[in-house]
Amino acid sequence: MILIDGKKAAAELRDELKKEVSSLKDKYNKVPGLTVILIGDLTPSQIYVRNKEKSANEVGLKSEVIKYPDSVEEKTVLDKIQELNQDETVSGILVQLPLPKHIDKQKVIETIDPSKDVDGFHPMNVGNLSSGYESSVPCTPLGCYLLIKKIEPNLNGKKAVIVGRSNLNGKPMTQLLLKENCTVTITHSKTKDLKEECLEADIIVAAVGIPELIKGDWVREGTIVIDVGINKIEKGIVGDVNFDEVSKVAKALTPVPGGVGPMTIACLLKNTIDCFKRSQN
Ligand code: NAP
């Protein structure tokens, strides 16, 4: 069984991105810039944002974090996004979710200029992705996609089963694998026989949020299994896949932690650089 090392893959991607930033600097005499807006004092959000800033600096991006208290008015945030949309030194804008209840998430997402939408959540990017056009792709499914391609560069005709249909993970994952000519089944909480569906798969991507949902006897030999889940239980952090059981049958499997997670931030940096490159063309 191949243990898919997300930390190593993310470090390799960051190295490539660092070189790319350096050559962009030589070519354009400027570097891509990432601005993150952080609202409130939720500890996980603060940790995510700190890690994003650290990684951005590591690869040589210009990075900035704008912080607001929980009580900030929606208009203040929307005005700031409009200002950043006009700022040529800002290539990518990310508003860290979740937001306080009085701020309309969709309004925030739709105010970000789609060409600077490094999260890939703007409806225009969602539409472009599903139409097969160039777009920003949400960072976690993009990371999963890159890990799958490392194991199996030619995905033509493979049967992929996506477990979970969220806008954040399952749906964009489906589009990415369709583009690679996979035959994709997307499953969810109302799917009749999830085990049967999984047993058909060459590739399983689990993005559910239920600890160890995917069992060893749900996976046939030779399947690539990508575990997006992050679940805190008594014994620690586990994924949506029963690692001990599935590692006995899968061809390749991502661990949790250390699998998909590290790729997410590296893909945010990649998206920022891609936005910069598109803006120069
Ligand atoms: P979400 O928005 O809560 O969506 C969960 C999906 O799973 C829904 O489509 C739901 O179906 C489906 N589902 C629920 N119970 C199911 C069942 N018994 N059988 C099959 N499908 C079922 O979750 P999300 O935001 O995509 O996140 C999923 C997991 O990924 C979470 O553990 C989250 O913490 C983790 N995550 C990890 C990263 C990372 O960087 N590694 C990033 C983001 C999220 P319905 O649509 O029918 O309700």
Image (cartoon, rainbow, N blue to C red):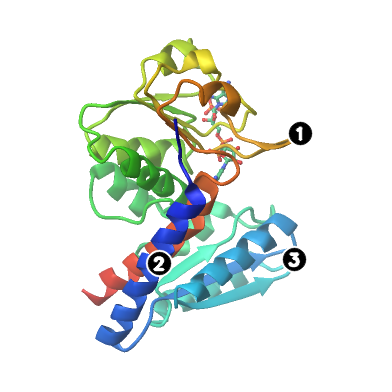
Q: Is residue 67 above or below residue 192?
A: below
Q: Which comes before the other along the chain, label 2 or label 1?
A: 2
Disc 3 residue crowd, few under 14, some 14–19, many 20+, Cα 10 Å:
few
Cβ atoms at labels 1 and 3 below 8 Å apart: no
Left or right of residue 238: residue 125: left
State the residue at coordinates (54%, 74%). Answer: 79
The residue lying at 76 percent from left, 33 percent from top is 235
Q: Which mark is first along the chain, 2 or 3?
A: 2
Could you say which is closer to the camera, residue 75 or residue 161?
161
Residue at the image point whose x is 52% and y is 44% from the top = 259
Tell whether circle 1 marks a residue whose Cβ is less than 8 angstroms from ligand 1: no
Residue type of the residue flagged with mark 2: Asp
According to the image, label 2 marks what residue? 15
Q: Is mark 2 on a helix, strand or loop?
A: helix
Residue 240 appears left or right of 90: right
Q: Position of residue 65 (x, y in %)?
A: 59, 74
Give the spatial CA distance, label 2 vs label 1. 34 Å
Q: Which quadrant contains ligand 1?
A: top right
**Residue for badge 3:** 71
